[in-house]
């Protein structure tokens, strides 16, 4: 019994060490990339400029992807909200997709006149 507990304790220690090693490897990779970036900034060379261009390009691409994601999420929200209010949901979805934030502002102004419609109550159960 005692041998099993000692074996489990060793396994737990090994598992903890593995997790710590994984974290240390991640930190080492981050440190290496940071050192490379710092060197590229300090002494620009062809490789340094390429690295900086890659960073800038990646940042721009991530920003554009984020904007597109927000645009689509807003259009989906408008569609669902218009459907709840009994408005033409597909029309408003297209308006927001085509015009972006301007269409969203127009929708927010127009939607004030349309309160949320409550769904009809379910029919009473049939007795028979």
Image (tube, grey):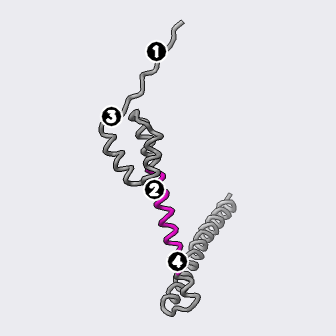
Residue 85 percent location from the top left of the image: 38, 35
Q: In terms of secondary structure, where does tag 4 sit?
A: helix
Quote the CA–CA distance across marks 3 and 4: 47 Å
Magenta residues, dominant SS class: helix
Residue positioned 45% across, 48% down in the render: 75
In the rendered structure, which segment of residues is drawn in magenta?
Answer: 53-74
| Residue at the spot of label 2 | 70
Q: In terms of secondary structure, where does tag 3 sit?
A: loop
Callout 2 environment at 10 Å: few (<14), some (14 to 19), or many (20+)?
A: few
| Residue at the spot of label 4 | 55
| Residue at the spot of label 1 | 124
| Residue at the spot of label 3 | 115
Q: Is residue 109 covered in magenta?
A: no
Disc 1 vs disc 4: which is toward the camera?
4
Quote the CA–CA distance across marks 1 and 2: 42 Å
Which badge, 1 or 4, comes first in the chain's sequence?
4
Quote the CA–CA distance across marks 1 and 3: 26 Å
Which badge, 1 or 3, comes first in the chain's sequence?
3
Which badge, 1 or 2, comes first in the chain's sequence?
2
Total marks shown come to 4
Which badge, 2 or 3, comes first in the chain's sequence?
2
Image: 80 above or below 28: above
Disc on res. 102: none
Image: 3 above or below 76: below
């Amino acid at each position: 019994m005692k041998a099993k507990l000692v074996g489990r304790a060793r396994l737990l220690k090994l598992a903890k060490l593995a997790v710590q090693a994984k974290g240390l490897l991640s930190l080492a990779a981050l440190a290496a990339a940071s050192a490379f970036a710092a060197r590229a900034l300090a002494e620009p060379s062809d490789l340094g400029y390429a690295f900086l261009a890659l960073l800038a390009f990646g940042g721009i691409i991530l920003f554009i992807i984020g904007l597109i994601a927000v645009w689509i999420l807003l259009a989906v929200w408008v569609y669902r909200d218009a459907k709840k209010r009994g408005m033409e949901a597909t029309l408003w979805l297209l308006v927001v997709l085509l015009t972006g934030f301007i269409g969203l502002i127009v929708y927010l102004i127009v939607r004030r006149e349309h309160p949320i419609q409550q769904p009809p109550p379910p029919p009473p159960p049939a007795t028979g």
